[in-house]
Amino acid sequence: MSDSTEPRAKVAPASLPPVAGVRQVAAGPHISGAPSGRRIMLLVVGALTPAALWSVWCLGLPAVIVYACCIVASVGTEFAWNALLHRPQTVTDGSSLLTGILLAMCMPPMTPWWICMVAGIVAIGLAKMLFGGLGFNLFNPALVGRAVALLSWLGVMGELKPYAGGWLVAVQNVPAAGKFDAISGATRLAVAAADRAAGGAYHFDLAAQYPALLFRNLAGSVGEVSAALLIAGGLFLIAVKVVDWRIPLGYIGTVAALSWAFGSDPIFNVLAGGVVLGAFFMATDYVTSPITKKGRLVFGVGCGLFNVVTRFYGPMPETTTFAILFMNGLAPIIDRMFMPHPFGWVKPVKEAKAHA
Amino acid sequence: MAGGAFRGGIHPPDRKAATCGSPIERAPLPDRLTVPMSQHLGAPCVPLVAKGDRVVRGQLIGETDALISAPVHAPASGEVVGIVSALTPAGIRATCVVIAPDAEQDRDAYVAIVPEHEGTGPIARAAGLVGLGGAAFPAAVKLVPAKHTPIDTVILNGCECEPYLTCDHRVMLESPDRVIAGALHIARAVGATRTVIAVEDNKPDAIETLRGAAHDGVEVLSVRTRYPQGAEKQLIFAVTGRVVPGGKLPATVGCLVHNVQTAAALADAIEKGLPLMERVVTVSGAVARPGNFRVAIGTPVSSLLALAGGLTPDAARVIAGGPMTAQPLGDLDVPVVKGMSGVVALTAEEAAPIVDSDQPCIRCGRCVDACPMVLHPYAIANYADRRMWDGCERFFALDCIECGCCSYVCPTRRPLLQLVRTGKGALMAKGVRR
């Protein structure tokens, strides 16, 4: 990008020599008042911390390994990329740390360490740095990392051994638990899908899953242990105006409404799987979501639509990753739907006729 | 009939407490007055005096025939010691008449103006009046009644929405009669039926004082404290609910806006024949003794800073005006000009960090939310950064009022306003009209 033959319009030199006793001469405005980019990243990290710590407490060492590998791979890739290409170092902006944490939270707890590392390298190297770094990526890096890991090692990721009874907890409410030996890595969503496919033969009580999903869900990705803590973190981000409420509301609202329309339990469908994590922390990624308010609502609704439709009519019960990635690709087009009309804009009626 | 609250805007810390209680002091005359011949938007004046001439206070020393211009008067009696090319606060060189004021002089005596024609406009022109809010647009041009666009509402802008500045606040408190007289003169000149003085609600004392002094139907309207409330289009919307169409003048919706200090100066010009030779300047920020000073035009900023006790050691940046729209001062010996509302010294912590345009846009949308013109500053800036001027045009770059809200809220401190200005400049150079 910097090799472009056309010089970019430089408007502000990084520093100017002192003039006549005054040390700084810079163009206005001369004050600034927004939280810095790094502060925003760290606020999001802070909002995720309770849920992350709780997942480590509940899942133990495997979760620690997943977090460590994802974070080291993400931050390390950004560092190495910049170092090898002699670019200004950007790891301190906090965005790759956030990507590492988010990536870990959407990986299953028993994921082998090397898959976590590859996912982290792909997330930052392929999905972010190759596009030009922070601000230029089209797709959410953490979700690209997860998608690549999932699809590359479908067998490994799909046949993970149940951890410390965690997966067994998921199926213990199912009378015919023995039937689940073949899919021992079943999440509640998978059980619900199997139950649905079997016409309710397993009598899987969705409402009975609420407490586990909210507070201690060991049958799912690392970050999905407590939906309650994720919701609290998300509401915190909305309260401190880091996150626009339109995306989570559009997303979760659509998931609830549509799954109700499909005859399922709306609350279960919101709490189970990655919807809460995705709606508050993944879909709200600034870079890969629309920039206009209306666009964000459309984006959130779109995520919810894709998520629920594929959940009920697709091959996999858990499609949050692909729902958000799909909408990431549409985000620039959604933005184009909502071009600004400036204050004082007058509909150019006469001009349109003249051109016609 | 109150109007609406404009969309967007910001709420910067106002930092007015240091000077809003400081009565206006008259600054002493410096050794040298450097009076630029171009202190306004429009054609520069031609000096009417030569080195060695004696001038008396109020004497016309610069004039031009151009329609959009404002003559310049001697701010003090003394000797012309040179006609030089000197740096002005705008950062460009201009022809300046340098006057050595007499040591002993009556600072209240002056030569009254001689308008060429009857009427408020010609008087404003003869008095060298420009918009004292900062834009320095020749006031007379706006005071000539237009035939096709009758004006029904005159709005005096007493918002002073920029942080630090309190000069308009003090003028409203100390000379409410002058402000109201000026408002009525303007209303009569253009035949307006409604005269409103709009003041942000963070100045309740000014609102109360003006209301106490108001007569002949002058309304004093309290408007929401939010930057840029004092921007012309936003203020018209707040007062009348009318929206000025893009690229059009306020007269299109029957409005005329003048600053409160301009109105007070107009009243002096009409009633006393007083030309514009002084203005009130707020000196604030990292100075030992912040205050408001009535300063002779041409006084070096350095003298004014000395009067305010000098810069404190942590002063890192000195600017001419409010921090959102001010010009930075590289040279502190530049003169005070008609449009200079303040001299503010910022410490390194207070001043916006200096960054370059390589900072990435993270598409957070804060600039979109803050833009009072409902633009997409990030998009205009991205196109300008890549010299894709047609993109700037498609995103309405020319509608930008350069308030700086976008830069203020940008988390990665992208120089959005500068990039947008670059785009606007390129479009205007290409002849693109709004």
Image: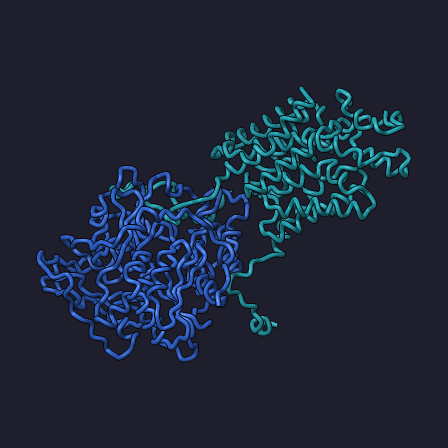
From the top left corner, tell me how far across and down residue A299 is, in percent: 66, 49
User: Which of B413 and A272 lies nearest the eye of the viewer?
Assistant: A272
Residue at image coords 47%, 43%: A34
Which residue, as the protein is rendered here, is positioned at the far front?
Answer: B212
User: In which quarter of the view is residue B104 placed?
Assistant: bottom left
Q: Tell whether A333 sits left or right of B355.
A: right
Residue at image coords 68%, 38%: A276
Colour-to-chain, blue: B
From the top left corner, tell me how far across and down residue B182 is, in percent: 31, 69
In this rendering, does residue B421 appear at all? no
Residue at image coords 64%, 42%: A283
User: Which of A326 and A196 lies nearest the eye of the viewer?
Assistant: A196
Q: Is residue A211 above or below residue A264?
A: above
Colour-to-chain, cyan: A
From the top left corner, tell me how far across and down residue B169 is, in percent: 33, 56
In this rendering, does residue A152 appear at all? yes
Labels in figure, total: 0
Residue at image coords 75%, 48%: A257
Q: Tell whether B364 sits left or right of A264.
A: left
Q: Tell whether B382 sits left or right of B345.
A: right
User: In which quarter of the view is residue A191 placed?
Assistant: top right
